Image (tube, helix red, strand yellow):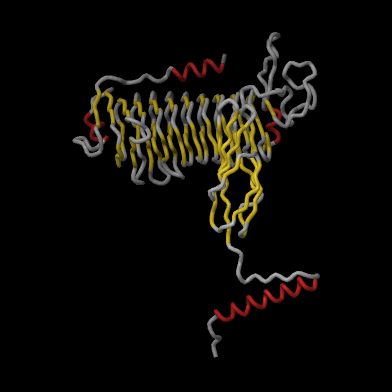
Amino acid sequence: MRTALYILVVLLVFEAATNISTPVNGPQSTIQKIQTAIDSASVNSTILVSGGTYYENLVVYKPLRLIGASSSDTIIDGGGLGTVIKVNSSNVEISGFTIRNALSYSQGIYLSGVSHVNITSNIINAASDGDGVSLDGSNNNTITGNTFSGNLYAVNATNSKYNLVARNIGASNTVGVQLWNALYNVVANNSFNHGETGLYMYKGTGNLLVRNIAVKNSEIGVDIVNSTGNTIIENSLEINRFGIDIQFSQGNTFYHNNVVSNTLYQVNFVNQQDRAFTVWDNGTASCSSCVKGGNYWDDYKGTDNNRDGIGDTGLPADGVDNYPLMSPYTPLALVARVVSSALNGTAPLTVQLSARVVGGTAPYAYHWDFGDGTTALSANATHTYHGTGSYTAKLAVSDSAGTADQDMVTISVRATPSNLILIAGSAGGAAAAIAIVTAVFWKRRRSTLPPSPS
């Protein structure tokens, strides 16, 4: 009930502004600037922008709809000069653009003290040290259906409440969503991978994180710091370094999450006192007809004696969960990762490459592209790189349900040193080899040094 209420409240906060339509027919047309169209548009009108690249830093200071023809070819480029789009008015919609090239530490789209703004269906690559979308003191907004890459924070909500961040996709952002001193926001059905942290919360209260996918991040799936009273449910946290990290946070509830194959810790408490004040199940003890359920942990080895889908032995699972699920609550996302026996070496370099796959529906199909014109179709492969250079070994995996994922690794191959002297034999022979190599090195080194002063 609480989950449904959260989502209902936030879905109703945006009212789209429609009415008069003002076309912008390309950067070489009569209206060459989107800002010109904004300045001349009446309140609550719609500005339609045709395909092209617009080198501008926009300020939207009145209620209107700014609609691009296609997010793939309608580009607003900030030229590295500042925030690409500043929104200083409520009741605004921005949709259908690629938004890129903000100034360092700036934003792709910046919402300041506004509400009922809808940011949807954009491609946002703002700055590696900046935000894709930043909400500052902004409430009741929706950030949905966008694709983020190469930002410090894909979405950064600071001092903001009752916002919906949903159905976004992010890759190679340092952090997917940050909630900083943020209250009662819903973060739902997003996917963030190949960054540092999927979802990060600091001083957050009453937020709902539901059905997100945080996979293959170098550090943490969900990171909760100095936060209380938040609900984290039905998320898939796979192949991160930490699945869940909790720092000085109490009174938060985790259940029906899939916590799978995280390499260092499935769940980590920085402050061990927080352990006793974190809830790991749906708390249905007061409901006689309800089944109390916790989370799915792929490393849980207990048994389900009464066959109710809840583990009965080896409790608590991962030291926290007394009601571990025997199978994933929601289907596990298909996640593939490449493991290589070596990342660099001298030619010819032979490496063992293996596919680490979780989730999806077996059986799997594998396709390797080793980056040197050769391929393979097995789960594990041994490959030799004969030439020097940098090679990208790519793995594509598909399952029987038709879903797919891919991963890659870079392998550097250098030439064998031409002056290397190898002498086989006894320990004495090894010492002689070291002495000869050392003598050759210093002979060549002295030949390159300037003469000593007389």
Q: Quarter of the image for the C terminus: give it.
A: bottom right
**Does 237 appear above or below 128?**
above
Residue 362 sits in quarter: top right
Foreground residue among 264 and 377? 377
Residue at horizontal 21 percent and vertical 36 percent from the top: 29
| Percent position of residue 300, x then y | 74, 29
Q: Residue at x 80, y 24 (%)?
A: 313
Q: Position of residue 169 (x, y in %)?
A: 49, 32
Q: Is residue 260 left or right of residue 103?
A: right
Percent coordinates x, y for residue 212 in the rendering: 55, 28
Asked if residue 200 shows in the view, the reply is: no
Examine the image and state in which quarter residue 394 appears.
Answer: top right
Residue 391 image position (x, y, % from top left):
54, 51
Residue lying at the far bottom of the rendered structure: 454
Q: 52 or 11, which is in the foreground?
A: 52
Residue 113, quarter of the rendered image: top left
Q: Residue furthest left?
A: 30
Asked whether residue 368 is in view, the answer is yes
Q: Quadrant of the N terminus?
A: top right
Q: Is residue 198 left or right of residue 21?
A: right
In the image, residue 229 sits, relative to residue 383, either above or below, namely above
Q: Is residue 257 above or below residue 373?
A: above
Name the foreground residue: 452 vs 336. 336
